[in-house]
Amino acid sequence: MTLQEGISHTVDTPIKTPIGTAWMDADGILWHRMDDGVSVSGSLAQRTAEVIGELLDGRAAPAIVDITDIRFADGEAREVFARLGSATPEVATAILVRSQENPVPGILLDFFSKLDADRPIQFFDSEDAAVAWARSFIDDAPAE
């Protein structure tokens, strides 16, 4: 399912991205859950950014990005994410990881912590904590 199919992607209607599933929840938080064992290339990262941009449609929102089961992100993917660091309507980004000790997310933690983003980025190994943190930015998202 893609945005081009004309399906209304509002609250809780998930869409498939090239590397996972994304949706807006009832609180106005953008979720992007990466598929289990996914390897992210530059082209997949770019297409994913485009799909997420279409989903947000210019609306500012906090986001939760779940990378707990990602397998790999190549250098081109990291370049895409770096380029998008401040060019996103996300007002804050919670990155959900399985644990600080998991080596693949650990490498990505290092990468994301060095992004020159104009929004807060925080790492969590608890979904509840990530949701609470993201909700604290709801008032920061400008009205449509």
Image (cartoon, rainbow, N blue to C red):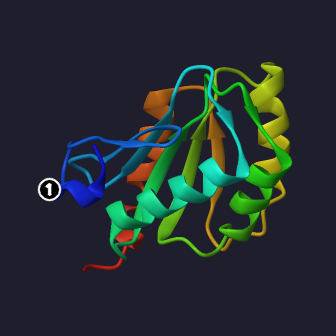
Secondary structure at badge 1 equals loop
Where is residue 12 shown, x and y percent of the image? 21, 42
Question: Crowdedness of circle 1 by 10 Å Cα count: few (<14), some, many (20+)?
Answer: few
Where is residue 89 shown, x and y percent of the image? 47, 72
Where is residue 136 shown, x and y percent of the image? 42, 55
Name the image quarter holding residue 123.
top right
Instruction: Give the residue pinned by disc 1.
Output: 8
Name the image quarter holding residue 62.
bottom left
Asked whether 94 or 54 is in front, the reply is: 54
Asked whether 41 or 109 is in front, the reply is: 41
- Kind of residue sitting beneath label 1: Ser
Q: Quadrant of the N terminus?
A: top left
Looking at the image, which residue is at 63% across and 61% down? 120
Left or right: residue 92 compared with residue 121? left
Indicate whether 140 appears above or below 65. below
Looking at the image, which residue is at 54% across and 56% down? 47
